Structures are given as C-alpha cells and as structure tokens.
Amino acid sequence: MSDVLDEFIERARAISFADAVDRLAIPVPARGRPEYEGPCPRCGGRDRFAVNRKKAVWVCRGCGAGGKDGIGLAAHVLHYEVRSRTGFLGACSAVLKEPVPQEGEHESDEQRAERQRRIAEAQAQAERNRQAQDAQGNIHREREINKARGMWLKASTERGRDMVTAYLQARTGFVVPPDIFDNIRFIADCGYYEGEDEGGRPLAIYSGPVMIAPIVDPSDTVIGCHQTWIDLSNARGKSRPVLWGVTKKGREARRSFLSDAGRRRPPTPLDVEAGLYTLLPTKKMRGSKKGGLIPILGDPDANRWLGGEGIENVMAVAGAEGFRKDTFYFSAGDIGNLAGPADPDSAFPHPTLKKQIANGQWRRVSVPGPKPKEGQNPAEALQVRAHVRQLLLVADGDSEPLWTASAMARAQARLARADLDIQILWPPEGTDFSGAISAAIAVQGR
Ligand SMILES: [Zn+2]
C-alpha cells in the first residue's frame, strides 16, 4: 500500500466522532434530548437510528448495526460496504471530505449509481413514513378537538350556575355577572382520568362537578375546552378537590389510587414524604389551546382587553374594576400560551434556584428569556385582534417571580405594536390577585 493511501486512512481515523457526525450532516438532537433519533438511512423506520455525539456511539436497532467510529457511521449512512476496500476508502473520503487518492481503489460508475439509488430510495421511504405519521397525528388531533368541542357544547348552560358563582366568589371575592354564562358551562359529574388500568384504558380516578370554558381560535371557532373541578367543601384548598396521583417511584413500589376494595383513598403522609404520590392539577385543557384563548366575559369586539393566565385572577381584577362593560375579559389557559416561545439565546441562569441533574451535581435553573422566538406563527401562542387598543395583562404572583417576570416581558414584546398600549398588572409580592383581592374584601367586610 502506498504511503499516500496510508496517510489518507490515518487522517480519516483521526477525525473525531463528533466531527464526523457533523460532516455527515446528521441532525442535532431535539431540544433536551441527549442524542439524535430518526429513521435509519438504510432500513427506515421512525426513530430506530440513534447517534450520540457526546458518548461517541451510533446504533440502528433495525439493522442491528452500530459502532463507535466515524468511518463506520459514514459507511452506514452512505451505503458503503465497509468490508470491501472500495467501500472502506469511500467512507474515509466522506469523513475527510476529500476524494480517495488516485492510488486507491475507486468504485465504478455502476457501483456509485447503484449506491446512490439505494440512498435515494431510503430517503424517499423515510419521507413517506413521515407523511403517514403526520397524517395520523392530524387525525388524532382533529379527533381530540372534536371531543373537547363536544364536551363544552353538551355541557349545561343552566344547571350549576349557583355552584360556579359560589366557586368564583370564594376565589375572587366577587359575585360574577350572569353574562359569564354565555361562555362558562357546567358538568355535574365529570370524570377525571389519570394513568391507565391493567387493560391499558384511561383510568377514571375521580368524578365531580366541573366548570367548563371554551378555548377559541382567532376566527372564534371552538378548538378546545378548559375544565376546573370544583369542591366547595375544600375552602382552604382553593375550593377544588384534592387529587393524588401515583409517581413513577410509587408505581415501582406498587402503590395505587385505589384500595383493594376499589375505593379512592388518600396516601399516608409517609408515602407522600417518600415521593410515592404527587398532587394532581385540578384544571385540565383538552383539544387544542395554542394560539387560542378562553373568553370569559364581555365582547371580543371591545377595544380594551384584560387577560391573564387563569380565569380566577382575571375575574378578581375584573371585579375590582367593576366588571367594565367596555372590556373583554379572557384567560390564556397557561403562561406558555400567554408568553409564547422564547428565543433560545435569551435564556439566562437563575441567580439562586438550582436543580439536581442526572449525575447528582447541582446546576442553576435556566429561565426562558424575555425575547420572543423569531418567526413565530400565530398558532404558537395567544393572539390579540387588530382592533384592540388597550391590553392589560394580569401577572400571576404565586409563581416563581423571576420566571414570571421574564414570561410577562416576553408576552409584552411578542404582542407589541404601535397602536396597542400594553400594561402588566402585578399583584402584591408573593400572592396572586384572586388571593390578594378576596383577602382585602374579607378584611373590609369585618
Ligand atoms: Zn437500520
């Protein structure tokens, strides 16, 4: 073998795995994932082919192939037969990004055409798989939206008014005007599903009265619904039921929601302490929410809009300003839909908060930054209509302050336009408006 060829192979072997991965244009891992997963360039599939840059290893679960060097990976991706001299040199050439030296064995034109045909075929198959998967996802999403829409449409507009009014009064201190029932409906006995039973079916762990609100998109189409389970007897727990879920650790320890007799039972304090159970949210959103909003009270044609993350906080502020007739009150459902996605480069480390990562070390929590992600499409977060001139956004004071401040700044930046006045309303430190205002009313009433 010539020196030129020896040197060519040595240089190819010296290319680090991560560099080879980049040169082969393997996509970077999805956000928060340690490795890239995708269809195999040879046998297709969806996520059977994985490349881990940090651990310097690749694998295909379909082909049963894998390895720790860039040349092997190049041969796999580019359909070279690595055991043949021609294929091996071809793979070296791919990681070096330079042609095989003259002295080396070159593939014939027919071999090259055949190899390129195999690559194109595998890519076409992967594309067909992706489209089929998208279509399946669309069908699933459509079905979920229809279910959520049906849930709101079928809910009662008459029954439950007393309970919803009492719930919102308990949370905000105000008796809401009856116009709220243009939007808010009620289900007397609504199942709460969590986890699966032994047959893999969704498991109903609770059933009780629900306040149900529509989620509408900018064209006023109902795309989802928002459920709040109510338990007026639990005045200290925000007038909502206490629902315990079993954590992963709890499942491993064979804990269950139900006793052997099939009755719901609260966990022992010891089990809670041990992290076997966790409190479940008593609000849920179904169908789609992105880009939509929850209309609560008033006419969306109003020039003044006032909204926030949750229905209760918005109603507390609405009550404090006398449920203004010139205002449309709305909720975003959650802070993500209000703030919208952040520009990844604007994230910053929290000055004090830390979390433990997999290897046991502590790392500062990264806070999504105040700058909105560029090139957002309207379906990614709540939209404010063009005729609106004044927008008041209610901040949630009982969440982590810095995180909330960054999210509210992002919402403001995202929705900013020359003819819209945007103001953020901050509650007293450490509380939220529903708590602060209802407490103030209780003091006045004494
Ligand atoms: Zn494969």
Image: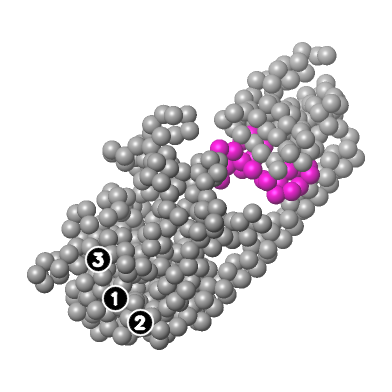
Residues at marks 1 and 2, CA–CA distance in whole angstroms: 8 Å
Q: Residue at x 9, y 70 (%)?
A: 446
Question: Which residue has dot 3 on it?
Answer: 434
Q: Nearer the viewer, mark 3 or mark 2?
A: 2
Q: Which numbered tag is attached to residue 257? A: none
The stretch in magenta equals 21-47
Q: Which numbered tag is attached to residue 166? A: 1
Q: Is residue 390 left or right of residue 209?
A: left
Q: Residue 177 in the image: state x and y as whole percent.
A: 27, 83
Question: Which residue has dot 2 on it?
Answer: 161
Q: Nearer the viewer, residue 430 or 10?
A: 430
Q: Are marks 3 and 2 in contact (CB under 8 Å)?
A: no
Q: Residue at x 32, y 81 (%)?
A: 162
Let me know if residue 345 appears in the view: no
Residues at marks 3 and 2, CA–CA distance in whole angstroms: 20 Å
Q: Residue at x 50, y 44 (%)?
A: 250
- Ranked by sequence position, the earlier of labels 3 and 2 is 2
Let me know if residue 91 appears in the view: yes
- Is the residue marked 3 within 8 Å of ligand 1, measured from its CB? no
- Ranked by sequence position, the earlier of labels 3 and 1 is 1
- Give above or below for 381 relative to 189: above
Q: Nearer the viewer, residue 216 or 9?
A: 216
Q: Is residue 417 left or right of residue 186?
A: left
Q: Residue 241 in the image: state x and y as whole percent.
A: 38, 63
Q: Residue 6 in the image: state x and y as whole percent.
A: 76, 15
- Ranked by sequence position, the earlier of labels 1 and 2 is 2
Task: Characterize the local packing of mark 1: few (<14), some (14-19) or many (20 or more) Cα atoms within 10 angstroms.
Answer: some
